[in-house]
Image (cartoon, grey):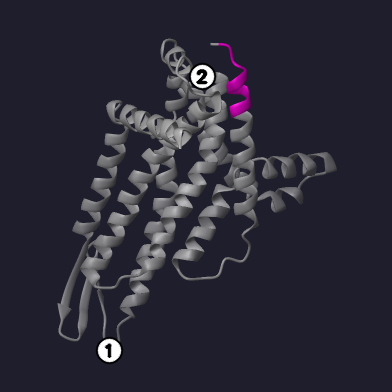
Amino acid sequence: MRIVTKIWALIRHTFRESFAKKTFIAFFAISSLVHIALISALNVDAIEAGLAMVSVFGKEVHSGSGGIDMHDLIIGVQRVIAFWMFFGGIFLSIFATASLMPTMLAKGHIELLVSKPLKRWQILLGRYLGAMSVMLFNVVYLIGGTWLILSIKTGIWYQPYLYSIPMVVVAFGIMYAVMTLIGITTQSAGVTVMVAYSLLFLDVILQQKDKIYALLSSKSYYYFLEGLYQLTPKTIELGQMNEALVIGRPVADWTPLWISCLLGLALLSLATFIFSQKDF
């Protein structure tokens, strides 16, 4: 219980630090703007029999006889929003949390932490979970808010859309394990951001690895690309899984999720080992 209390104290400290740096406020403000834009874009006219007309970004869509199924329309809208929320949430979360590990290692700060009755793994885990709590709060607010707006305005409460919340959290948790390792080894927020965004870009390329293989003349290039694919977070595939969950389609293969989670755990363990060996 004392361990939980110590880690919880570190989580709260990280949360307050993010708030003080205004990164938390900036994320919250952007999410609020998304909500305001959605409220302004979506107009619904209702009649006794149900929804008569929905206007999305000024374009009218009629329901009823000769119209489209309103339930399918809302699922389609949420599918598009879920796509942008998944990658947008990860993009913003990287920016909002990239400095937390390097800041922890700043001279004066880290000496104070290690002087406390805390084990190194407790310090790192508390910081990691603190960053995740910042991200979780904002993602719940961002995605949960859009779900409430759509549900209240249309009267269609489509719960699968909320699967986006755990999927974004898990995907970012894997990415933040990478960021933790980079932050611990380089102590640079700039390098951490560049590596994280580079991995997202690299993942887009590696999704086309089968097509690239066909152009390669040497088997060594095949093994190189396959190794990169296995050793990088599979964010694009997690986004595709998220889309399938939102529209109610069975996920064909959960393997990318399990492999990415194991990779994240391994990188976080490596970061913990390196941090425990540092001399402060």
Give the residue drawn at x 25%, y 57%: 38
* Residue occupying the far front of the picture: 1
Give the residue drawn at x 59%, y 53%: 257
Give the residue drawn at x 40%, y 46%: 88
In the rendered view, would you say 156 is above or below 182? below
Reply yes or no: does residue 252 show up in magenta: no
Q: Nearer the viewer, residue 6 or 41?
A: 6
Quarter of the figure with residue 81: bottom left
Res 65 label: 1
The residue where tag 2 is placed is 187
Tell me, yes or no, if residue 63 can be seen here. Answer: yes
Q: What stretch is highlighted in magenta?
A: 272-279
Tell me, yes or no, if residue 59 can be seen here. Answer: no
In the rendered view, would you say 148 is above or below 113? below
State the SS at label 1. Answer: loop
Q: Nearer the viewer, residue 205 or 173?
A: 173
